[in-house]
Amino acid sequence: MVEGKTCLITGATDGIGKETALSLAKQGAKIIIVGRNQKKCENVVSEIIHLTQNNQVEFLLADLSLMREVNGLAERIMYGYRHLDILINNVGAFFRKKELTEEGLERTFALNHLSYFLLTHKLLPLLEHSKTARIVNVASIAHIRTDMNFDNLNGEKNWSWYGGGWNAYCCSKLANIMFTYHLSKKLEGKQITANCLHPGFVASKFGDNNGLFSRSIIKTAKFFGAIGVKKGSETSTYLASSDEVEGISGKYFASCSAQKSSKQSHNEKDIEKLWSISEEYTSEYL
Ligand SMILES: NC(=O)c1ccc[n+]([C@@H]2O[C@H](COP(=O)([O-])OP(=O)(O)OC[C@H]3O[C@@H](n4cnc5c(N)ncnc54)[C@H](OP(=O)(O)O)[C@@H]3O)[C@@H](O)[C@H]2O)c1
């Protein structure tokens, strides 16, 4: 039950995040959506309020591929809200071409993994104020396609034009799962759970940020094989709100049930290495 709870969802101006926000608003939660486009945020907030008659829907702006902005966002939340009950790290994208952010981070690694890592760390004190809090990380089944490529985590090597971006994406989703497993261990004894999920292959805007070639392939695949965004938001909504998962932590879910993630995702040595590398990359703000 989420009535009266405060829920923050990143990347909630479209796709799975937006639909999750709508479902939780319908159930009476106070929703804070995080997006990077002011106009889009305003429109989504109005739309959710209109559809749910729940006026407790707000937005905060941040480009989550920049750690400076993730940190600024966290500070605004820490000072502006008395407590936070549910954090859904949902933002994510696939970039076929290698791009570095102005902070020198490879964009997939920064947006899909480091934003989850840094935002969660910064918001833990607020989550601890909640009687029971939940952290939900949106990962993907794509994680099964890779090991953690530590030698190319931040795009250190050249990318092949066909597979480099996809490999970085798969790695970032493996990182979401490893992060969840380790976080859950660190949270033992506290009233905060952390779980992650694969939402399904969803006909969202996923992939639309790329050039015509990749966009066409992804669009065709979505046309033939994807589920709608409502269905695609079900596992995120379930993990955020269902009584069935009260107290359950450190699990990977798909179709609203706990599933096995890849063997690599349980590699303790890699999990610890990823954690300390992530600390190094975000150390300026931790
Ligand atoms: N779609 C799938 O089949 C699928 C499968 C497995 C996992 N996932 C995961 O599901 C999550 C949500 O993806 P989706 O399919 O819903 O994608 P989507 O439709 O493209 O939505 C992505 C959301 O993230 C926002 N966003 C992107 N870059 C941002 C940035 N730099 N700063 C702030 N917000 C940013 C977008 O904002 P704008 O509205 O401004 O673009 C949008 O609200 C991702 O983590 C993805 O990896 C998706």
Image (cartoon, grey):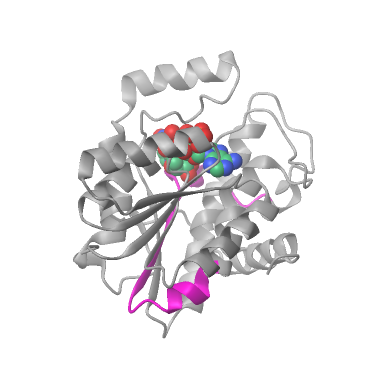
Residue 118 position in % (x across, y down): 61, 61
Can you tell which quarter of the image residue 27 is in?
bottom left
Indicate whether residue 252 is drawn in magenta. Answer: no
Residue shown at the point (60%, 47%) measured from the top left: 64
Q: Farthest residue toward the bottom?
A: 189
- Residue nearest the observer in this picture, 136 or 67: 67
Residue 253, can we see it?
A: yes
At a point 62% along the width and 63% down the height, the residue shown is 270
Q: How many marks?
A: 0
Image point 47% across, 31% down: which residue? 206
**Picture residue at 21% right of the left edge, 49% below the top:** 26
In the rendered view, tell whether residue 65 sits above or below residue 27. Answer: above
Indicate the quadrant containing the C terminus: top left, top right, bottom left or bottom right: bottom right
| Residue 232 position (above or below residue 281) | above
Residue 241 x %, y %: 26, 60
Can residue 254 be seen?
Answer: no
Q: Where is residue 56 in the image (x, y as percent from the top left)?
A: 31, 54
Front residue of 278 and 253: 278
| 12 sits to left or right of 210 | left
Residue 90 image offset from top left, x and y in percent: 45, 48
Residue 121 drawn above or below residue 151: below
Please indicate whether residue 256 sits to the left or right of residue 62 in the image: left
Q: Is residue 136 magenta?
A: yes
Q: Give the range drawn in magenta.
A: 123-149
- Quadrant, the N terminus: bottom left
Say whether residue 245 is left or right of residue 263: left
Q: Which of 187 and 145 is in front in this view?
A: 187
